[in-house]
Image: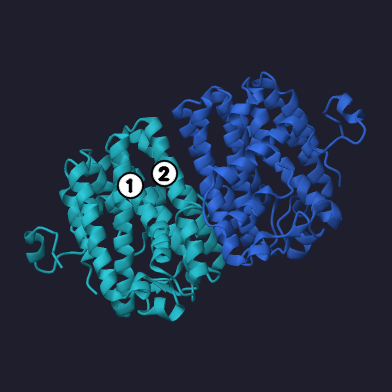
Chain colours: A cyan, B blue
Amino acid sequence: MAAPAPARRRRTPAPPAFPHPRLADAFEIYFKDALSERCAGPPKLRQAMRYAALGPGKRVRPLLVLLSCEAVGGDWFHALPAAVAVECVHAFSLVHDDLPAMDDDDYRRGRLTTHRKYGEALGLLAGDALLAFAFEELTMLEGAGVPAPRVLEAVRRLARASGSDDLVGGQALDMAAEGRRVRAADVEAIHTRKTGALMGACLALGAIAGGADPRTVEVLDDAGRLMGLVFQIHDDLLNASSSLSRLGKRAGTDAARGKATYHRAVGEAAALEKEQSLLRSARLILETHCLHPTRLLALLDTLAARER
Amino acid sequence: MAAPAPARRRRTPAPPAFPHPRLADAFEIYFKDALSERCAGPPKLRQAMRYAALGPGKRVRPLLVLLSCEAVGGDWFHALPAAVAVECVHAFSLVHDDLPAMDDDDYRRGRLTTHRKYGEALGLLAGDALLAFAFEELTMLEGAGVPAPRVLEAVRRLARASGSDDLVGGQALDMAAEGRRVRAADVEAIHTRKTGALMGACLALGAIAGGADPRTVEVLDDAGRLMGLVFQIHDDLLNASSSLSRLGKRAGTDAARGKATYHRAVGEAAALEKEQSLLRSARLILETHCLHPTRLLALLDTLAARER
């Protein structure tokens, strides 16, 4: 397969997974502040929220938001509220997916899941509160100089991406597909909803924060959806082969549970080919529509090059 | 106790519980449309959402929104998206409160709870999706002519009222208080968060939709919180004495579960007195700050006069 990234990146010895330390640090500080200073409530609940949201994680979605803002010519700093919002939505979905009524997982990222640590009631409520907080935080884009009508567009996009047609709907389809024979189109529908929609929102929200025109926001949303599909196909392949220490949860859990995965539907070779084809489409959109896509492209390549 | 409503209302033979058929009908049509036409996703999930949201209910919160809009001189029609949004948040909170990890209720409003009807996973997801949809729907205030910065304020207020410091936080405190000896102040804190905050948001959002100035929005939020406390103290008293047929769930369930109720903390007489005192404060705010409070005041009286 052709390596689409510039050769320079490939030669760097043992690169960090997401080589944007300044952005990543700034986000981490801002995120902790948001959840500690601006998010009130009973101490136990806030503890559970912070446990769910601030634990070890790749922070792919916030980086997508910040780098999308940069890619359209904005200052990534202005997109921080949107980055926090999408990470809160992501954390909400993980906490609820892990609950006994859903995937019933005891471990995530190498430690106890939120409901195993704080009890099922607080796990459920922490997820709910993170979803609500995402929208409160997102409105802070206005304070960062984004015009109110554009902030409202961001709210609308995040609500849709989180809701019945996308994130939550994808989880419903995923649960229904468990243990059943699935076709590639079904898996694509699930992955696009569960992962693609929120990654689409990441790029769209970043572009809105960066002052992009509506047409650019729309195509970046499309690119994000493709990236989400790449990410998820890659994740499924990793799950099938990785060790506990690398993935933070037991390898092969998808297969054991009969989860709908792309490679189970089409085979590993076809899944890898699909991944590369999606990657090329996403790259093409970014290269065509962005002023400064370099770091966003690099992140995309990193996502698709995570070690198996 | 003094009857604060005009004598005319009292004399009406067998008045309907919420005597605003035109508003109530308009809301019902708009609400069904919103959940059927504008809310996409897998059929089973949408069914569960509609079951949770569109079942028999008093629609107190939507009426508060619409009548608050009218009270500040606006056309209640413009506030319909906000009325849908708060009712979705309310439905979300009921579905999640009923889950086995929380109150573990099998019946609500005389029929099976959502998770008992559709399974626990879909119950959980329907609640999540209703919360997300609330924010999508709320942004439609912009299309109803409300300036974008004011719509953003509405989003911020609804997110806060739904989140860790209010609705969800109140539920966390309520769970923690179960079976423990509670003081009046603790119960007030729980009721103000669980019920008061969202009712405060109802009045605030209605006022925003009606074009009220920020100061009026703020005091109406306060009045709504007081009304929420009235409503909840009254509800607790009803629960202690009502029959299954009237309440739609088993009477005395709060006591059996050791729920934190105001009358358990201070006795029934003091609870009734507190209710009347709160009622007077709320009336005073509405009479002082609203141009056309008549129907909003009547609704307030109806809430506090529900039969035991």
Label 1 environment density (alpha carbons within 10 Å; few <14, some 14–19, many ≥20)? many
Subunit under mark 2: A
Indicate the amino acid at tag 1: Asp
Indicate the amino acid at tag 2: Arg
Picture coordinates of residue A303 (x, y %)?
24, 62
Vertical relation: A52 (above or below) A89: below
Q: How many marks?
A: 2
Subunit under mark 1: A
Which residue is identified by label 1?
A221
Question: Left or right: where does residue A18 sit relative to residue B248?
Answer: left
CA–CA distance between discs 2 and 1?
A: 10 Å
Which residue is identified by label 2?
A157
Vertical relation: B277 (above or below) A67: above
Q: Quadrant of the C terminus of chain A?
A: bottom left
Picture coordinates of residue B184 (x, y %)?
70, 50
Where, by quadrant of the figure, is residue B47 drawn?
bottom right
Q: Quadrant of the N terminus of chain A?
A: bottom left
Where, by quadrant of the figure, is residue A272 drawn?
bottom left
Question: Left or right: where does residue B274 sit relative to residue B149?
Answer: right
- The secondary structure type at the circle numbered 1 is helix
| Badge 2 vs badge 1, beta-carbon distance below 8 Å | yes
Pointer 2 and pointer 1 on the same chain: yes
Q: Is residue B165 visible?
A: no
- The secondary structure type at the circle numbered 2 is helix
Q: Looking at the image, tell me whether mark 2 or mark 1 is earlier in sequence order.
A: 2
Question: Left or right: where does residue B172 sit relative to residue B105?
Answer: left
> In terms of depth relative to the viewer, which is nearer, B300 or B66?
B66
Q: Is residue A17 visible?
A: yes
Label 2 environment density (alpha carbons within 10 Å; few <14, some 14–19, many ≥20)? many
At horizontal 40% and vertical 79% (from top left) the residue drawn is A255
Question: Left or right: where does residue A9 sit relative to residue A115?
Answer: left
> In terms of depth relative to the viewer, which is nearer, B227 or B72?
B72
